[in-house]
Amino acid sequence: MDIKSVLGSKIDAAFTQLGLQGQAAVQASARAEFGDYQANGVMAAAKRAKKNPREVASQVVDILDLAGIASKVEVAGPGFLNITLEAKFLAQNMPGRVDAVDEVATIVVDYSAPNLAKEMHVGHLRSSIIGDCLVRVLEARGHHVIRQNHVGDWGTQFGMLLTFMQDNNADGRTDALADLESFYRAAKVRFDADDNFRSRARLAVVGLQSGDADSLSAWQHFIDISMTHCDDIYQRLGVTLTRKDIAGESSYNDDLAQVVEDLDAQSLLQESDGAQCVFLDQFKNKKGDILPVIVRKSDGGYLYATTDLAAVRHRTGTLKADRVLYFTDARQSLHFKQIFAVASAAGFNMNNASLEHMPFGSMLDAKGKPFKSREGGVIKLSDLLDEAERRATVLVRQKNPGMSQDEAESLGRVIGIGAIKYADLSKNRTSDYVFDWNQMISFEGNTAPYLQYAYTRIQSLFSKGDVKVEDLPSQVIAVDEYERRLAVTLAGFNDMLDQVAEEGSPHLLCGYLYELATRFTQFYEACPILKSDGQDRSRRLALANDTAMTLRQGLDLLGIGVVSHM
């Protein structure tokens, strides 16, 4: 159950009864002295009515019907409502599962989007794992989610690559493409230095765009090889994208001319220096000049804006999306504001969908610079994952000297990849963050290894006590204070997922899991579990099991695995 929604609707009903306008704005409280939840909307409602907030809050408390939900409601501060939940209500709302939403939406999520001319690098990490976390959360809540991997698989660079592949791989061997980065660099050198090669490359682009069968066949061969690299990365990262989710730039090629024609038919196009542009008044620079959205260059070529407009039309018209979420770095914020505005003005948003850019910051080194290799180049994502697994394996061997190398490497894969992902996902999406090996693979603090260890510690309780989970009670009423604090945190799981789904912010899930693990540690230290007897023992074991299930489920929503021991 979404506790915040239940409390909010009850308080809003009281507002209506008192003739007040406003919303409850209920938030979970992290401090026990404030109650379990706090409503902050009374002051705003009182201000609108020009009344004293504390007096209004008292009136709300007098008529508020929270029977069976809250054991205590108090007015605090300038007009807050502090709400303490009923013990039985808490017992009924332990998670165990993710609650389905009442209204299912069709949600398109655009994420990852690597350039298939090169191997994936660290710059693709954030889009891939943040987008995938949202996909997992939205699907768990019951929404119909359509993944869209808008890969870069079109344009002039592919003429260069196809010509180079033809010259160096004519017998069909794919060895030359084993290292895409080297292949791309070699092709670029040839393109810049050889006039004949450059001319043939441009002809290859023409053949590709005109649908020449041989050109398309060679292009598809290159795309297949390139996607093999991506598939390997997705599998290692636990990202749920597959080949069927690819909707690259090429898929919109046939609609680009029509996009321009439709913009022109609606008198939205203006010519500027030979280019076809859309000018909207809301986009002006510091000098007051309107920034154009160029949809066709003076040479007749199309741009990213044209493709993105075609994508909006496809996603809202053909796919019938209610929401479209775009996970790209913050540098593209203006681009998407313009695209959404043009799509709205042109009627391309067929379903009146909510178009939402979910920007994210950059990964930085210790000096606050973009994270790169020691040589100053972009780091391949595969190399970063190799290093994470290696470091985690070393750490596992240090903690378990008698463990076999194979077992250590198996644990190292789960712990290392989880550490990389969690270090990213636990940061506010919109912020830059500093990449720190020592911090992310630590067993202390807000890290994946800490949460994974908390899970294994609970599992060890069951094995040491020879406890069968199926014998535990399905619902328990917390008795001691530390039991109660743990129960309150467990009950807030679905509320938190609502916020993650709405805001596109996985760090809220990470913060919740860290708080849950911390609350469990406090409970574990204050309340004997295996050494207790009777109802105390079964109740505390049930709370421990609920914690383990929630940790496992929460980590799975982040795309992070758990292990049986560490």
Image (tube, helix red, strand yellow):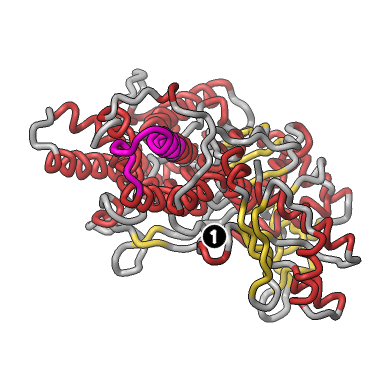
**Residue visible at 70% across and 54% down?**
339
In the rendered view, tell whether residue 555 sits above or below residue 22.
Answer: above
Tell me residue 82's x, y (percent): 64, 64
**Residue visible at 28% across and 41% down?**
416
In the rendered view, tell whether residue 13 sits above or below residue 138.
Answer: below
Q: Amino acid at mark 1?
A: Ala
Tell me residue 368's x, y (percent): 35, 68
Asked whether, in this view, residue 480 is left or right of residue 106, the answer is: left
**Does the magenta portion include 543?**
yes
Residue 54 showing in the rendered view? yes
**Residue beneath label 1, please?**
330
Q: Main secondary structure of the magenta part?
A: helix
Which quadrant, please, contains the N terminus?
Answer: top right
Bounds of the magenta span?
527-548
In the rendered view, tell whether residue 3 sits above or below residue 386.
Answer: below
In the rendered view, tell whether residue 276 sits above or below residue 168.
Answer: below
